[in-house]
Amino acid sequence: MSAFFESLAVTTVTPQNFFICLGAAFLCGLIVAFAAAFKSRVSKSFLISLVMLPLIVHTVIVMVNGNIGTGVAVMGAFSLVRFRSVPGKAKDIASIFLSMTAGLACAAGFVGIALIFTVIAAAVMVVLSLIPYGEKHMDLRITVPESLRYAHEFDDLFQEYTSSHRLTKAKTTAMGSLYKLTYRIKLKDAEKSQEFIDKLRCRNGNLEISLSENYDSPEEL
């Protein structure tokens, strides 16, 4: 059992050890990508990056002849390139550093530790994703004519169909003849959403209304 935690690293890199560590890095990348995609909306390119990152980290560390400090500095710079223009969510950043750690462990020859650590960290990420937190809100967008005093026009309907509501945005459109209002609401009963929208239509002159689930912005941390 103790041999499972021993390093395969030697002074001279052999093809056998290189491919064993490379295969372990690839497996770690797949596990991290699965955990990152669980209960989350992520792009295909980001998943590919998570799979490839341990392989790249492993190869860079090997090519710098085991100089861990140089390897970490190089890969740290590479991993932050994605966030130079658009900040990522905290889970995305954690997934990238998890992939990097797995790649570093594989490059050091600790294949067993890399696999165990990746499985445990991915399992924790999945379990935390399953834990409900906060309240589920929806975005309600209502278009109203400029003649409508919208400040308290829908208060009775909100009181009847929602447990909470808040006006988050109001802007003019169609040369100022219309207002587009955005509310953050929590419905008391989702089954009555159509009834709620029908009553709103009677108030806003049958103009456009949309009700959609609220998602975290990808730029949020």
Image (spheres, rainbow, N blue to C red):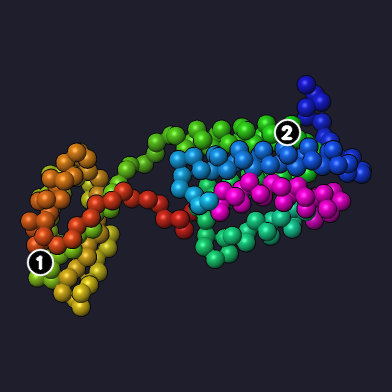
Give the Cα distance between marks 2 and 1.
Answer: 65 Å
**Front residue of 98 and 207:** 207
First along the sequence among labels 2 and 1 = 2
Secondary structure category for the residue under label 2:
helix
Amino acid at circle 2: Ile
Q: What span is in magenta?
A: 45-70
Queried whether the magenta region covers residue 111, the answer comes back as: no
Q: Which residue is mark 2?
A: 113
Question: On the image, numbered disc 1 is attached to which residue?
Answer: 148
Q: Is residue 12 left or right of residue 211?
A: right
From the viewer's perspective, tell me whether residue 200 is left or right of residue 122: left
- The residue lying at 80 percent from left, 56 percent from top is 70
Which quadrant of the rendered structure holds the N terminus? top right
Q: Position of residue 186 (x, y in %)?
A: 25, 45
Looking at the image, residue 144 sits to the left or right of residue 135; the answer is left
* Residue 53 in view here: yes
Is residue 105 in view from this perspective? no
